[in-house]
Image: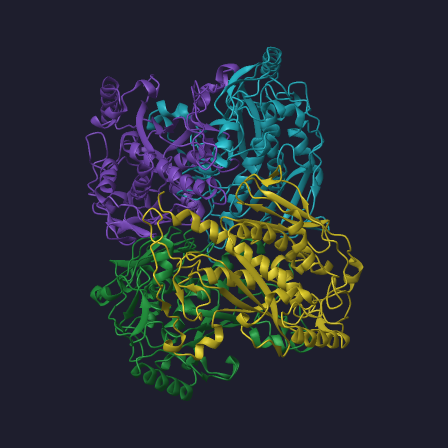
Chain colours: A cyan, B purple, C green, D yellow
Amino acid sequence: MAGNTFGTLFRVSTFGESHGPAIGCIIDGCPAGLDFDLDFIQHQLDRRRPGQSAIVTQRKESDTVQVQSGLFAGKTTGAPIALIIPNEDQRSNDYEHIADAFRPSHADFSWQAKYGFRDHRGGGRSSARETAARVAAGAVAKLILRSQGIDIQAFVSQVGHLILQQPYTELNLSGTETNDIRCPDPVMAEKMIRLIKKIRKAGDTIGGVVSAVVRGCPAGLGEPVFDKLHADLGKAMLSINAAKGFEYGSGFAGVSMTGSEHNDLFLPVDGRQRTVNGGQWAAEGIKTKTNFSGGIQGGISNGMDIYFRVAFKPVATIMRDQTSVNSDGEAVVVKGKGRHDPCVVPRAVPIVEAMTALVMADHWLRNKIYKKGLS
Amino acid sequence: MAGNTFGTLFRVSTFGESHGPAIGCIIDGCPAGLDFDLDFIQHQLDRRRPGQSAIVTQRKESDTVQVQSGLFAGKTTGAPIALIIPNEDQRSNDYEHIADAFRPSHADFSWQAKYGFRDHRGGGRSSARETAARVAAGAVAKLILRSQGIDIQAFVSQVGHLILQQPYTELNLSGTETNDIRCPDPVMAEKMIRLIKKIRKAGDTIGGVVSAVVRGCPAGLGEPVFDKLHADLGKAMLSINAAKGFEYGSGFAGVSMTGSEHNDLFLPVDGRQRTVNGGQWAAEGIKTKTNFSGGIQGGISNGMDIYFRVAFKPVATIMRDQTSVNSDGEAVVVKGKGRHDPCVVPRAVPIVEAMTALVMADHWLRNKIYKKGLS
Amino acid sequence: MAGNTFGTLFRVSTFGESHGPAIGCIIDGCPAGLDFDLDFIQHQLDRRRPGQSAIVTQRKESDTVQVQSGLFAGKTTGAPIALIIPNEDQRSNDYEHIADAFRPSHADFSWQAKYGFRDHRGGGRSSARETAARVAAGAVAKLILRSQGIDIQAFVSQVGHLILQQPYTELNLSGTETNDIRCPDPVMAEKMIRLIKKIRKAGDTIGGVVSAVVRGCPAGLGEPVFDKLHADLGKAMLSINAAKGFEYGSGFAGVSMTGSEHNDLFLPVDGRQRTVNGGQWAAEGIKTKTNFSGGIQGGISNGMDIYFRVAFKPVATIMRDQTSVNSDGEAVVVKGKGRHDPCVVPRAVPIVEAMTALVMADHWLRNKIYKKGLS
Amino acid sequence: MAGNTFGTLFRVSTFGESHGPAIGCIIDGCPAGLDFDLDFIQHQLDRRRPGQSAIVTQRKESDTVQVQSGLFAGKTTGAPIALIIPNEDQRSNDYEHIADAFRPSHADFSWQAKYGFRDHRGGGRSSARETAARVAAGAVAKLILRSQGIDIQAFVSQVGHLILQQPYTELNLSGTETNDIRCPDPVMAEKMIRLIKKIRKAGDTIGGVVSAVVRGCPAGLGEPVFDKLHADLGKAMLSINAAKGFEYGSGFAGVSMTGSEHNDLFLPVDGRQRTVNGGQWAAEGIKTKTNFSGGIQGGISNGMDIYFRVAFKPVATIMRDQTSVNSDGEAVVVKGKGRHDPCVVPRAVPIVEAMTALVMADHWLRNKIYKKGLS
């Protein structure tokens, strides 16, 4: 109930604070027999790691994952998988100045209002450092999805006022990881990097948008009422630190369209043969002409690409003095100190992918229960 | 796991199809001793009812709620509250033409892909008729929130390209229910109604945006990691039929701002006295200068207004013929038939409020567990 | 959290009080495509119905089940199944004398301690009438299990000091339903019925034991740590009104045995061939010599019969005056009034079966997720 | 769903195998502000530790607990508490002989039937070593209960045929920890120890019973339908390795009693004054003459002592050769090897207490939500 667990069948519980000994997670519900590719998992963590480039925070963490349980002979056993990532480069002294001051637009005040006191060191549990555990767990989910041919790719599509205008279908997504900002268009990437460097130099921060595409998802994932696939994706994205909005398919832009423009017409299947599959009806082969639905209709995937966008606000920690209050409501000045990202989106890309993977693996398992009825 | 239950402590399970005997819900976890205001609940259902005005579907349903359990002497007992709403005006024959044809951008295809067959009458379980049960349950949640001084108001802020530009703080929200479209600005309301009538005449449909404000929420609601207050609000909104996007506070627009512009500075409290409350620290009185955070920081309410926007696509059922396929993948034509809304947003207003109430009541109860620690 | 829902994948939420309009349930998670045998479900309710014989309560309820949702063309659709059973023969006046008096060993006092007030009519929500909803839901679970060849049979094995000494393997369980007490041994049944009639005549009540056997369960059901199959069966049984104990396999008697006596040796399989099943290992064919384990080892079924026993206390309502207190702690006399069972076990037999079915169907679904790994 | 989490509000997820790097748990939902008494937690682990006396397994584990998260300045923060216990004395070679042989009455066969393969080293995840994580989490739960004056004491009441006949009210429970078997009667303790030594010498094992008493529990804990307090206690106990039965209050013996004998009469309160408590009714002061109910009526605590008994089978690992089969169903001989307990009950005492504490702390939190209604 305290909300540190995500998922229903593929369940991840995370723990850890910015300045405690370690962060980590337990994955419960991973099927047995999965080849556990530790290098792949570490690689995902490396993509999120602080200090990886000139435009992210310079905190030095190797983020080396340690597996505590759940494996035998290189495979998952069906038992819980515990993953631990030790904290290495804590500078708690950097936070003494906010022991009794609320940083603007941080969780300091609301946390204290909830619990009566707080761990002020690096934001404690509300630090984005917690997302490293999500990335580790998401990497295990990706291993499941990979075995099913389901692929997830996220990329940066906006920084400040710089907007990548092309639809994802016209982009070469394989170029995403070739630059520090993780934007698939190299020209735009260069502009975004310059903007971030300029913003950082001014002691300020800027917002951005991460877009994501899921390819290879079969029709049938998602539950039709409350646990619609896009509702669970939306919750997953909005649970990421600094997220402010979520839209899928046509999103907010679809509001201005008419039904006759927006409806995705089904295309007839040329010479289609019923799949010989115990007489069962098969959905494969039926496609739509357009995809304003974003691959999800009535909360259930329809076999087309799933795509969505996530808005991230500018980072709240800026390198400028700000007026604020202490817990007695008295005016104080919060100094601009510490090591922080000038813009979250480059490091948010692997986090968006990880949270997407957790949702997709969970719904893939959920769908397994029902898809073959009583057989 | 099949996803027909919403909430963790204030839990609502809904049932029913468009063309079955009834729809309804069980509310589990409502505290004992709540005055059960049946007129209020019926009034909320009346706000969502079909046939209420010229710009909504003309299906005739009285949507009369029947209480089956959970009350004694006019108060809730702590036992589950079962609410039933009989279906009255079904015209199943209206749907024979889609018994084996997939309506574009409906759940017909994805549902069949998931379960192997489907109840085609009126969309079956995927019909928006299911939301009547949510409104009934949400009305009970509103009774709880009302007793705590927490108020929820939704309104239409966009229809097609017609956008209400003022921030909610400059609108007279009490005017929302005085027109058929539920837009608080009477001039804009008139334009929106004219647009919808024109669109309907053309046999087409149009999208829209519903905005919502929660006032009177104390600081401390929401859980800091996965169950952030805005993440649960987002999921709730995205689970409503036809929803395509969600943003809170500055939302997608906040992306273009810098941290120094976006941060909400805390204001000093003049002559503030510590609340004499067993020595416990009290958050009341600390406010922010701006509210780009939308009343939520780090996933936890901070005592300021909570506000957000929900995008709805144009209704998929249009009164025009559309090309599609049957379950053999063969080309068919889907006729434009039946009784449907030309735009969902006027009836979505009470649904958005209801889902908001479910989230807020749930988090209010969740916060009760921890807010006083071990006392 | 208020505990009116049972199960994880096959989830049942019940509602209703003894003296409200109706009782019922929502079943969420029933697979699509199940033939819905309404006669079978009604028959299970008839087995639990009051007034069915001379040794049970004479309250007159037809307990006719009404299906509100979840079916199409005689089959389940995957949508929630709502079942309603109207209350017919309420005599609320029978309970005026306990409006402010706590009946000994009833839930009156503890309920009032929890909620601050209570619905005193017929025990309100704590009435055993709630179990009719369980029997209805359990009947649906039995339909699933029947399709898998899993069979559940319960019977009365003790009334007061009268104990059926034979192990279930030596009894003809098909005789269970041929007498009013539901004891498979006709001689013992006759003795038990005489004892109950004598006890009733004295205005008193008596306890009993219900035994149950599950046959045809494949190996692999149950989760290894907290959700052991027998732990979930135990919780299910102990949640039935008046239950005081649960034991499976050798149970409390196994305590006095040594490991060398108690261990169930596996028997070699004569000329066994590996099942040609995509190369997968198959557990079928491996049996144990004895079955002190009760068909469950390490919390997981091993393919042998599952069997267990449930102890029920004497009914608390007796037809004699008893001293008690009112809510001011003052001495009062509680009159012996109303219509009640002198012994719960004959009507507990279908309830034990229903709760067993809920657990088995739930674990059958849970096992489906994992049993074929990533295929 | 894979069942490695226990509890609803006070939630514990455990991980780890007998022969992995570590075992441990995450506690989610512990209230903020609890003084974290690490010595107390370590002491509880020491009570369960192997090698602590001559009558338990001689595996050498210090079972030193390491706290990874959730604390600040010696208090809980409301964030998840991760506890890790490294494994130290693994002898995996001891288990090579069962890499492809099913030990009788172990989880080897059923586990392989479920997952297709298994970690054979020391029973893997089905090892009772997992219970160390439960004891650590239970110790935190005990800290909460201690702050509320709720006390839990378990003790050994039977080993083989040796039965402690006195009711717990006639025993000096403070003597429990003064002998190796944890029986409060020193004479019986001596007999039990002698019996276990004799059984061990014969290469055999023996069963036993652990009894438990909860004192100081207020009226009102437990939910009235499925999550009855005794149903959750029963599940908790039955989830412990080797448990075969559970009974509370009069238990199986109550079956032979009549209602007039078994009913617990409420006693009038001499000169009782309504507690001046905002006009709210108070349950304190109302007691029963007898306590066959075991402190729980209708699933809700009534303020009297809660007491119950748990049956444990003889340990399956014996120091004798046993016939069995391998995964091809061929006859094999399983050698008696390894380090094991001849009787589980002395080490089960702290485990029973820990699981009791998890249930009680969870229900104490659950009751907090509702007990003061809307205030």
Numbered marks: total: 0
Percent position (x, y) of residue A365? 53, 47
Percent position (x, y) of residue B346? 27, 30
Is A179 or C282 nearer to us in this picture?
Answer: A179
Percent position (x, y) of residue D110? 62, 64
Whether residue C223 is visible to the viewer of this picture, yes or no, is no
User: Which residue is at the far bottom?
Assistant: C187
Percent position (x, y) of residue B215? 35, 29
Q: Looking at the picture, does residue D26 appear above or below residue C130?
A: above
**Residue at 44% over, 77% down:** D255
Find residue B202 and report its image quarter.
top left
Is B5 or A184 nearer to us in this picture?
Answer: B5
Find residue D172 and report its image quarter.
bottom right
Q: Looking at the picture, does residue D265 appear above or below residue C194?
A: above
**Residue at 24% over, 70% down:** C60
Q: Is residue C312 left or right of residue C20?
A: right
Q: Is residue C39 left or right of residue C7?
A: left
Q: Is residue D305 left or right of residue D100?
A: left
Whether residue D370 is visible to the viewer of this picture, yes or no, is yes
